[in-house]
Image: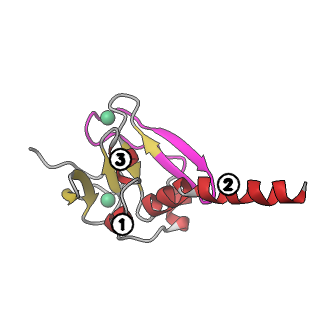
């Protein structure tokens, strides 16, 4: 398989495996590419945040906020998504192949956002107690 190019910095994406799921991580900026359901599957796996080795550079993230980045697989412009959870993050998703691009550090936050239901039920309990 031909190696993919990073849509952000042009670096080479290298395939990394976590359990049975293969994702592509940029060897330069450490952003991560997930094919369609991989991000959903991975965020359910314990310890999967280890694949996200970079730290989120917010300064750089805002810099690229206006730029459209192409899907590394189908080369169409990706759609910017805003996840306004515990950690607000911007990520890109491809309208064609449904792949998702996370900048370095974003997958960790994406996964952490997913653990919200626990906090929510705790908040609901507090609410009930007050009533
Ligand atoms: Zn890169
Ligand atoms: Zn695509």
Residue 124 visible within the image: yes
Spatial separation of the CA atoms under disc 3 and disc 2: 23 Å
Looking at the image, tell me whether mark 1 or mark 3 is earlier in sequence order. 3
Q: Are marks 3 and 2 in contact (CB under 8 Å)?
A: no
92 vs 88, left or right, is left
Residue identified by numbered label 3:
41
| Residue beneath the point at 49% across and 68% down | 57
> Most prominent secondary structure in the magenta stretch?
loop
Residue identified by numbered label 2:
121
Q: Quick one: 112 or 60, which is closer to the camera?
A: 112
Pinpoint residue 47: horizontal percent, then vertical percent: 36, 66
Residue identified by numbered label 1:
47
Q: Which residues are magenta?
A: 65-91
Q: Judge whether residue 78 is colored magenta.
A: yes
| Residue beneath the point at 35% across and 28% down | 96
Looking at the image, tell me whether mark 3 or mark 2 is earlier in sequence order. 3
């Amino acid at each position: 398989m031909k190696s993919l190019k990073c849509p952000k910095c042009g670096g080479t994406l290298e395939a990394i495996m976590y359990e049975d799921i293969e994702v592509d991580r940029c060897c330069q900026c450490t952003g991560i590419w997930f094919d369609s359901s991989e991000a959903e599957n991975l965020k359910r796996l314990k310890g999967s945040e280890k694949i996200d080795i970079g730290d989120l550079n917010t300064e750089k993230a805002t810099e690229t906020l206006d730029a459209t980045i192409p899907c590394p697989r189908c080369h169409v412009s990706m759609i910017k998504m805003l996840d306004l959870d515990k950690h607000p993050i911007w990520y890109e998703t491809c309208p064609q192949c449904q792949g998702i691009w996370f900048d370095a550090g974003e997958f960790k936050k994406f996964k952490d956002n997913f653990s919200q239901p626990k906090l929510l039920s705790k908040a609901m309990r507090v609410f009930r107690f007050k009533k």
